[in-house]
Image: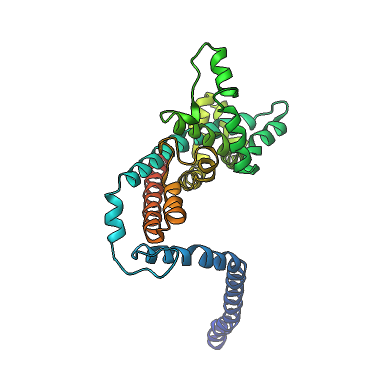
Amino acid sequence: MTTQTLERPAGGGVDRLPARRRRGGVERAKARAGWLLLSPALVHSVIFVALPGLMAVYLSLTNARVAGRGKWIGLGNYVELFGDAQFRDAVLRTLLYTVAVVPVAMALSLAVAIALNQKIPGRALFRTLFYVPVVTSTVAVASVWLWIYNPAAGLGNQVLSFFGMARSGWLTDPDVALPALMVVGVWQGLGAKMIIYLAALQSISKDLIEAATLDGASRWQAFRHVTWPGIAPVHFFVLVTSIAGSFQVFDLIYVTTGGGPAHATNVLTFDIFTNAFERLHIGYASAETVIMLVFVGILIGLGRLSVRNREGS
């Protein structure tokens, strides 16, 4: 008996060891497969994101121009930037554009997603129509809105005249040009956010909503206590992509206003373009790019804190 008792644990230990090794081998194989599948995206990120980013940081510390190598000047570009009134105005306009467009677009896209998640006639058609601007070239979108904002025969002024309101210069009025482009930004980005929210809404179990309704919850209470927490992780993704997109607005402004009138729509990306490719101040433009990335990081961090606080509440 004593011999058998001693042999069984030893035999069992011998049997378990190969099983552990097999499990470890499977896990390592999965890890290798995962890295292999990720490698194209990682290579792309290193070549087209990380290396250009490091190069921009380096160039921002030089007085580089298109022709010839630049000399190391340290923080000289940054000191000059913060004394540049045009740069400060461009940053302010970019922040204003972001603060105005991102929350409005997120709220409207969520409302549209909730509406199109219901069983309504033509639901598939409406989803397609809302998504069309996303896959349409920004140049084509800008051309359509140039006609809408045409001071003489545009649809915008025709609507104002119909309601007895004074005509607007839209893109030729410095006080109206940036808000007018904000409307275009909200409209064009609505479909992409709607699709994301729609997918999140469809992932919520209908049993939870039915259970809340049976317990006497109103639609608002069911949305607040069931739907909203269920789509909470999606908010941060939409927020990050929206902030990054709003800071990168360029082609719309390039086609419609060219930064005018009177620099009223000269946002940060357009100012970077002007300094880099018109004034040929590559180092100066690189410093602007680095500062823009810092602003984006700060806004994303603040947005993450806001989402965490809402999830906690």
Image-quadrant location for residue 198: top right
Can residue 225 be seen here? The reply is no
Q: Nearer the viewer, residue 115 or 178?
A: 178
Residue 120 image point, x, y percent: 69, 26
Q: Residue furthest top?
A: 164
Q: Nearer the viewer, residue 176 or 248?
A: 176
On the picture, is 96 further left or further right than 82? right
Residue 226 in the image: above or below residue 220: below
Q: Residue at x 37, y 68 (%)?
A: 70
Can residue 94 be seen here? The reply is yes
Q: Residue at x 40, y 70 (%)?
A: 69
Q: Nearer the viewer, residue 157 or 192?
A: 157
On the picture, is 81 further left or further right than 8? left
Total numbered badges shown on the rendered structure: 0
Residue 74 image point, x, y percent: 29, 65
Image-quadrant location for residue 14: bottom right
Task: Give the position of the N terminus as an image quadrant.
Answer: bottom right
Residue 164 image point, x, y percent: 52, 11
Q: Residue furthest bottom?
A: 3
Q: Nearer the viewer, residue 177 or 126?
A: 177
- Colouring: rainbow
Residue 32 image point, x, y percent: 59, 73
Task: Give the position of the C terminus as an image quadrant.
Answer: top left
